[in-house]
Image (cartoon, rainbow, N blue to C red):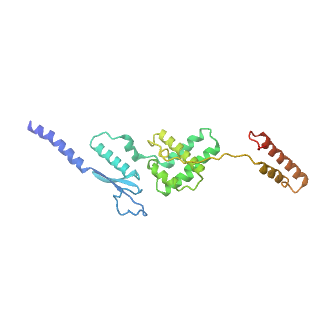
């Protein structure tokens, strides 16, 4: 009877020892340019975060993120799994992240089937392949899950574009990350959380009477060196200008 009791009380003690032997901690693999490269526990840099796991054997696992907080969440999930608590699958799945290049290629293939204009597809490809992927590789970002709003905002601050072009490029990023969210690869759209860009559009005003008369005079100086050909060219050009002049809803001031 007492022996049976000893067996039942000994089992939890073994589990405690086994649990104590399991450890997981977060550390940083700094880039050569990082000013804190000698401090592996520095939390505030954007260098990749890794997990040091000791579970009978020592191993190092990439946390697939540059955020210390996200890496800590993954470490807590692993500890919960060891303790028998049910981990959240969406957090542990971050260790098996989707590559950014794979997500971009999948999105571009999708929009090609939507019968969109070639210009629209071309602009999306330029924004995502030539710009986003190039920037991400330069900053050693390879997984879709590594991108957050702060990183995208820092990238946008480097753009040297007109306000209207910046706004359109931001909209293309939002569309891409909406697709990634719908696929279940990420849980929120980092581009949607960025502040919107204000781009004022100016109304195109009609020519003044003076500008219109100057345009007609310029037509008389246009055309080929051959007088006959030049006469035909000027006649066609004048007819087009007159058509534009009188067919618009807004005509010159009378």
Q: Position of residue 208 (x, y in %)?
A: 76, 48
Quarter occupied by residue 41: bottom left
Compare residues 251 and 43 and report the one nearer the observer: 251
In the rendered view, does 89 fall on the left or right side of 54?
A: right
114 w.r.t. 153: above or below: above
Q: Is residue 147 visible?
A: no
Residue depicted at 87% across the width and 49% down the height: 232
Q: Is residue 154 visible?
A: yes
Q: Position of residue 183 (x, y in %)?
A: 48, 39
Compare residues 18 and 185 and report the one nearer the observer: 185
Residue depicted at 80% across the width and 51% down the height: 215
Number of numbered labels in the structure image: 0
* Residue at far top of view: 1
* Residue at far right of view: 228
Q: Position of residue 2 (x, y in %)?
A: 8, 38
136 w.r.t. 82: above or below: below
85 w.r.t. 44: above or below: above
Compare residues 154 and 182 and report the one nearer the observer: 154
Compare residues 89 and 202 and report the one nearer the observer: 202
């Amino acid at each position: 009877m007492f022996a049976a009791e000893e067996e039942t009380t000994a089992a939890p003690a073994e589990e405690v020892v086994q649990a104590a032997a399991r450890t997981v901690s977060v550390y940083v693999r700094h880039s050569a340019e990082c000013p804190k490269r000698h401090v592996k526990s520095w939390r505030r840099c954007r260098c990749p975060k890794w997990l040091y796991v000791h579970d009978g054997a020592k191993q190092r696992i990439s946390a697939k993120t540059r955020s210390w907080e996200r890496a800590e969440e993954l470490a807590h999930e692993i500890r919960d799994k060891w303790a028998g608590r049910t981990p959240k699958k969406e957090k542990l799945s971050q260790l098996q992240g989707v590559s950014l290049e794979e997500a971009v290629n999948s999105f571009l293939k999708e929009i090609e089937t939507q019968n969109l204009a070639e210009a629209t597809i071309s602009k999306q490809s330029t924004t995502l392949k030539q710009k986003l992927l190039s920037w991400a590789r330069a900053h050693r970002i390879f997984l879709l899950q590594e991108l957050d709003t702060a990183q995208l905002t820092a990238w946008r601050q480097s753009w040297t574009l007109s306000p209207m072009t910046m706004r359109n490029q931001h909209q293309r990023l939002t569309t891409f990350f909406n697709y990634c969210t719908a696929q279940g690869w990420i849980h929120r759209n980092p581009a949607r959380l960025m502040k919107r860009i204000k781009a004022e559009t100016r109304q195109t005003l009609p020519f003044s009477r003076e500008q219109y008369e100057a345009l007609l005079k310029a037509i008389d100086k246009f055309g080929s060196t051959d007088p006959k050909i030049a006469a035909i060219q000027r006649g066609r050009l004048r007819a087009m200008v007159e058509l534009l002049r009188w067919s618009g809803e807004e005509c010159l001031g009378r």
